Amino acid sequence: MSAYSIISSLLSYVFTTIIYLFIFSVIALIYMDIKKMGKKEKDEQLAPSGLKDKNTDHYAILKTVKNKKMGDVKIKAAYRINGKGVIIGRSKDCDICINHKFVSVEHFQVWYDEGCWYLGDMGSKNGTYLNGTRIKKVKVLQSGDSIAFGGLEFIFREED
């Protein structure tokens, strides 16, 4: 038996193993995708029967305060948010996208949990301000609070 035939046999075993590992990983990905789809369908079936996420029944408004620093930024007069929460930032993937040079890609988030609304900065460069004070950790929001960021200002109002 020559060295060539030994190397050839060894490489054929290696490539066969690689092909089986590839096939196994594809099957595993398909299984996980099917499992995820099944869970999503189950959640959708449960929602109409009254088993909804407890936070979807809570809503709030972020009302824009007009000021001279806004310039030509295109933003709505108000944004309605639900209890699941929203991420506000410059990215198109954010729930509320504000294309302004002083707004971070993901600037801050607002969400509802256990009877309270919360505000959390997401590591923004220019900071998020609650009633004029820069926040470092998660803060509880009250109706009428002022949220400022990137030269913009909003008034938070909880809907009844």
Image (cartoon, grey):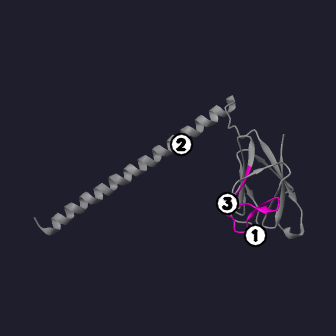
Q: Earlier in the sequence, mark 1 or mark 2?
A: 2
Q: Is residue 66 left or right of residue 109?
A: right
Q: Quadrant of the C terminus?
A: top right
Circle on res. 89: none
Name the residue rendered at 66%, 32% in the picture: 51
Front residue of this view, candidates 34 and 71: 71
Q: Is residue 13 left or right of residue 139?
A: left
Locate residue 1: give its quadrant: bottom left
Q: Amino acid at mark 3?
A: Met
Q: Amino acid at mark 1?
A: Phe
Residue farthest along the top direction in this orientation: 49
Element marked by disc 2 = helix
Q: CA distance from mark 1 to mark 3?
A: 14 Å
Is 48 above or below relative to 61?
Answer: above
> What residue is shown with label 1?
102
Q: Determine crowd level at label 2: few under 14, some 14-19, many 20+ residues with C-alpha closer than 10 A.
A: few
Front residue of this view, candidates 108 and 2: 108
Q: Residue 149, percent across and down?
A: 78, 64
Is 38 above or below relative to 154?
Answer: above
> What residue is shown with label 2?
36
Q: Amino acid at mark 2?
A: Lys
Q: Residue 91, percent across and down?
A: 69, 62
Q: Which residues are magenta?
A: 118-136
> What residue is shown with label 3?
122
Q: Reply yes or no: does residue 87 show up in magenta.
A: no
